[in-house]
Amino acid sequence: MSRFIERHPAWALITIIAIAVLLWLIFSVWPPGLEEAIGRKRVFLNAVFNGITLGGLYFLVASGFTLIFGLMRNVNLAHGSLYLFGGYVGYAVSTSTGSWTLSFIVAFILTALVGVLLQVIVFRRMEGQDLRQTMVTIGLSIVFADLMLWACGGDFYQIQTPSWLIGPVDLPLITAVKSSGEPVYLRYPMVRLVIFAASVVIGVAMWLALNRTRIGMIIRAGVDDRDILAATGVRIQLVFVLVFAFGAGLAGIAGVVGGTFQSLSPGEDIRFLLASLVVVIVGGMGSIPGAALGALIIGLAEQLGSVYIPTYAIVVTFLIMVLVLAIRPQGLLARR
Amino acid sequence: MSLLQSTQLRATPPASAARRAFIRAWPEFENPAAWLVALILVIMPLIASGFFLIEIFGTTLILGTIALSLMFLAGYGGMVSLMQLTIAGFAAYMVAVFGISANTNISLGWPWWLATPMALALATAFGTLGGALAVRTEGIYTIMITLAIGAAFYYFTNQNWAIFGGHTGINTVATPHFWGIDWRTDIAFYYVTLGVAAICYFAVQYISRAPFGLALQGVRDNPRRMAALGFNVNAHRVAAYAFASFIAALGGVLQVWNYRQISPGSVSVGACIDVLIIAVVGGITRPIGPFIGALIFVLLRTFALDFLVRLGLDGNRFRLLIGLGFLAIVFWSSDGVIGLWQRWRQSQRPRTDRPDGGRGHG
């Protein structure tokens, strides 16, 4: 961090100012002039919170994608299909058993199994052939999409939020002050906050596992040079299968999350594949902190954009990607 | 000097040398099968009815032209771009926006001979810009970035009502009408698509053997060495994008004339991937591949429903069939249908007669 400030003082200053402005906008009571200029603070805060929680969901999808890429250098364009598959499995489990938590576990296990099959049957056969692997995953995503359309139809599904998570909570953030001098606090859906907290926990756990454990050390070594790692006697194929299973399982969990606070339908697979592509391009391929930063940026940009410039919300996301590519083609947090 | 000596040493007369050079440049002219295909294509209106002429062969030629632009980038430049259909769609939108259509509040009402060059120029510029962005990365990154560009364009057309007409798109686009001929009647339109496709085909064929195309193939095989030799690698790649964009734009113009309407559905992510499927199934090492792939794709798309129903299966599983076919091709042949055909031919041929390697990438 301090090295970044030393190297790019101007960028560091801009970043710090932007963060300070954002924090001020979130925590202060807005003066009337500002409310007239850009609308009410409640709208803004809602957009920010929606953006952050959406970023949490994007992080869950993109971290699996970026983990798989980082270790195995294969771009799994069927990742969106895994997301949708996890969502449908979660829906089936939660409607039949009524347990939300169980749906996470089953979705994780089943998508991880699909991931294991993919790695063993498909990717191991064509190791090192990037383009061919990418083409195969495109073909697989078409087949999966049609199979899921066959099995589940074109309807919208939404996973039932468990009763202990329904309803809003008051956050200690003042949105406005009434004329009587009484502050009005922001009310926000509990389930989204819980999901966001869970994705932060998963992210931190992944970071710790990668940086503080033995298996994490093996994975990091594999990212740097997998041939040498294999030569030292590590069973690299087993590591590949495990990482692929874990990344796929994360996509499955994300599917349940997405099915809970958005909805599941054909086409969502492409949407989330695209979101994770943009997230990892912005954050840097193969980097978990990069995926977190990219997810946060893209989530915020999408939600703030859809509130303040509704027609061009998607263009904002795209412009961010173009800007990152123009300035730092390898992504914000990737090292090269 | 050495060139002079070598021509003097060779015993063959100059006319035959020129002829040989010609044949080397245009191998199709020596191949009787190519002449036969060309003849069939030209007299097609006598054979096929209106439905087959436009819905099968016209559509094949249009999709083949768009896929040809991808084949050029992927086969000669080593850059798999998923935004070729987006460029075609952009050109189609521009024809609708600048030309005449039922959406009078959007269309500017220019005559076709003004609107079409404008659309081509803008789409080429759009594709070149996208290419300039994409060449900052390599390999799989290119796929992802071009896919992201295509998807961004799709969502943008869905949301923008001022220029792109939102999710209903622009309808009843006027088609050219001059020299007393309505160029959208089946036979006239078929010849327009055939002409454009043939010009694009021969242009790609020519460029692949011109110095620029050879340098591009050098860049594909070893960018570092080409850079060391003094070639500007990125400039070659961007120029390849510009050329491919122009071809894709031509395909897009034909497409909007064919359907007379353009909507976000025709530039969706699925359609972008369809173009990749067409090119890969046909084979991305030769310009003829995309047209073969397009014919297979269009035939499947049109008749798979009847075929599946006749087999007692659900007719809506057409995309499953396409996806499985694509998977099979990618799994077993890196060079699409052409590769399969060549392998079959070589296995039929006696061993002595086999040509040396290096003919695959032409």
Image (cartoon, coloured by chain):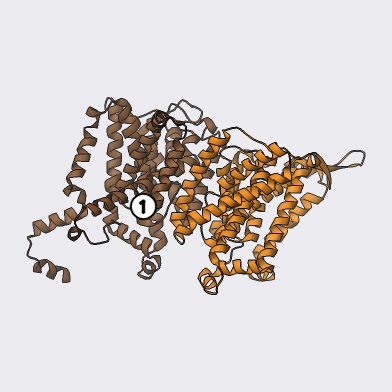
Chain colours: A orange, B brown
Amino acid carrying label 1: it is Ser
Instruction: Bin the neighbour count of mark 1 within 10 Å (Cα to Cα): few under 14, some 14-19, many 20 and up.
Output: some
- Residue A127 drawn above or below residue B327: below
* Residue that protrudes farthest toward the bottom in the picture: A232
Identify the secondary structure beneath mark 1: loop
- Residue A160 drawn above or below residue A210: above
- Residue A211 drawn above or below residue B162: below
- Residue A203 drawn above or below residue A304: below
Q: Is residue B286 visible?
A: no
Which residue corresponds to the image point at 66% horizontal and 57% vertical from the top-left? A293
Instruction: Find disc 1 in the rendering and name its residue.
Output: B333
Position of residue A304 measured from the top left corner of the image (x, y, whole percent): 68, 45
Position of residue B325 measured from the top left corner of the image (x, y, whole percent): 40, 43
> Where does the C terminus of chain B fall, quadrant-wise?
bottom left
Which residue corresponds to the image point at 37% horizontal and 53% vertical from the top-left? B334
Which residue corresponds to the image point at 92% horizontal and 42% vertical from the top-left? A181
Q: Is residue A277 left or right of residue B237?
A: right
Quadrant assignment, res A324 = bottom right
The front one of B233 and A65 is A65
The front one of B224 and A129 is A129
Q: Is residue B30 visible?
A: yes
The front one of B160 and B20 is B20
Q: Mark 1 lies on which chain?
A: B
